[in-house]
Image (cartoon, rainbow, N blue to C red):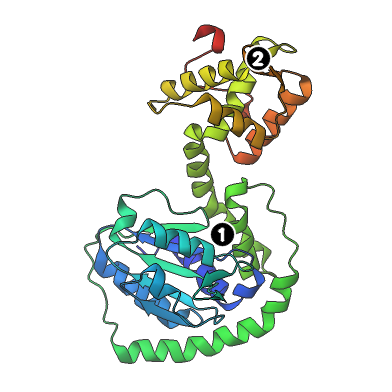
């Protein structure tokens, strides 16, 4: 159970709690899996190790906003379910420079989060600043870990963590880290883990190797993201008719066929699709009787490729699109 991967991920979380002011987005550790005994043990251990740890349960958005302001807690949340509103609030609280309006004031609830909840077993909506670890049943019994052992670990380690903070906080705040090799979704997490060990390049390399799994999952999830589908539709249309114009309604038909080829049955609204193209930076020609048209220039093609790569679409990295259609003419 205590694999190298788990050790490195936990090390990153603990050290991030020590220098959390050095990161713009605080990471979250999301504990999943059916072995609640081992999950509870892990949360107890992290309570001993992390800086300013505070165990919480029965947390609601209102009660979370009643916590002390600006302490930089490490939040250890253990409860049966986490509502969508609470998830959104926790995501907002993970951003260092973002204040939360509450009761006529502005709350600073920035801090590392450890979340253990049954709801994570069925939900895929946790943000990509989170690291997920699975607690699976094991035959070996858990060793004793009574309150005296916890006290000894906390007493010894908190002093070491404070020394680490004093020695590394300035370096972490000055860290100039290039996260461009990761997709946009994972760059904040990569920077946070790098800041946790600002002077240890080898350890950073080990931790980043572990992020490859999250990177792969992130890219796979993008297959049905509307932005990625829109970009792929542009690329399909360009491959068929470079230099021509294509109506937004035709592009939405291509996108719909791509979704269908990936087993998705939700409907793309052409109006919403057109707005998404605008958000992605594509400028259409003035509307005519059939609607708005996008000119398939080389610049449009290049932008579609670049933005798709930035968003982490795996198939774009190979210069291809997939999904069971060759374009609007085939729809």
Secondary structure type for disc 1: helix
Does 331 sit left or right of 35 as displayed? right
Residue 171: quadrant of the picture: bottom right
Query: Sequence-wise, which precedes: disc 2 or disc 1?
Result: 1
Looking at the image, residue 50 lies above or below residue 238: below
Task: Work out how far the residue at label 2 is from the one at label 1, CA to CA, in angstroms.
Answer: 45 Å
Q: Which residue is mark 1?
A: 207
Residue 287's x, y, as percent? 68, 19
Looking at the image, residue 31 lies above or below residue 277: below
Residue visible at 42% across and 87% down in the picture: 153
Residue 326: quadrant of the picture: top right
Q: From the image, which quarter does the N terminus lie in?
A: bottom left
Closer to the camera in the image, 3 or 232: 232
Closer to the camera in the image, 15 or 232: 232
Secondary structure type for disc 2: strand
Residue 273's x, y, as percent? 56, 28
Q: Is residue 255 visible?
A: yes
Looking at the image, residue 17 lies above or below residue 8: below
Instruction: In the rendered structure, find residue 17 and report the number of the disc placed on it.
Output: none
Q: Is residue 315 visible?
A: no
Residue visible at 65% across and 14% down in the picture: 246
Residue visible at 68% across and 83% down in the picture: 167
Instruction: In the rendered structure, find residue 246 and report the number of the disc placed on it.
Output: 2
Instruction: Count the numbered circles shown.
Output: 2
- Determine crowd level at label 1: few under 14, some 14-19, many 20+ residues with C-alpha closer than 10 A: many
Residue visible at 61% across and 20% down in the picture: 248
Residue 47's x, y, as percent? 41, 79
Does 166 sit left or right of 140 as displayed? right
């Amino acid at each position: 159970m205590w694999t190298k991967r788990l050790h490195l991920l936990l090390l990153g979380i603990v050290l991030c709690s020590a220098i959390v002011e050095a990161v713009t987005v605080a990471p979250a550790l999301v504990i999943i899996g059916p072995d609640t005994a081992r999950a509870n043990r892990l949360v107890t251990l992290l309570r001993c190790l992390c800086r300013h740890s505070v165990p919480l349960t029965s947390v609601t958005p209102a009660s979370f906003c009643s916590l002390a302001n600006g302490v930089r807690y490490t939040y250890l949340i253990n409860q049966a379910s986490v509502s969508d509103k609470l998830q959104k609030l926790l995501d907002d609280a993970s951003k260092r420079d973002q204040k939360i309006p509450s009761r006529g004031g502005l709350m600073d609830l920035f801090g590392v989060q450890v979340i253990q909840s049954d709801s994570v077993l069925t939900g895929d909506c946790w943000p990509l600043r989170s690291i997920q670890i699975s607690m699976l049943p094991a035959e070996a019994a858990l060793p004793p870990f009574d309150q005296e052992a916890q006290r000894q670990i906390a007493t010894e380690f908190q002093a070491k963590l404070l020394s680490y903070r004093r020695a590394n906080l300035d370096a972490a705040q000055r860290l100039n880290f290039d996260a461009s090799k990761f997709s946009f979704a994972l760059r904040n997490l990569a920077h946070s883990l790098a800041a946790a060990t600002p002077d240890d390049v080898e350890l950073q390399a080990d931790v980043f190797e572990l992020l490859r799994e999250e990177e792969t999952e992130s890219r796979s999830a993008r297959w049905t993201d509307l932005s990625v589908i829109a970009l792929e539709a542009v690329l399909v249309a360009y491959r068929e008719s470079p230099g021509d114009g294509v109506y937004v309604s035709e592009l939405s038909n291509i996108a719909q066929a791509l979704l269908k080829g990936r087993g998705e049955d939700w409907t793309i609204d052409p109006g919403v699709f057109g707005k998404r193209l605008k958000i992605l930076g594509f400028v259409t020609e003035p509307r005519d009787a059939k609607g708005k048209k996008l000119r398939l220039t080389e610049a449009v093609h290049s932008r579609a490729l670049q933005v798709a790569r930035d968003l982490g679409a795996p198939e774009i990295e190979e210069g291809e699109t997939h999904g069971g259609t060759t374009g609007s003419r085939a729809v």
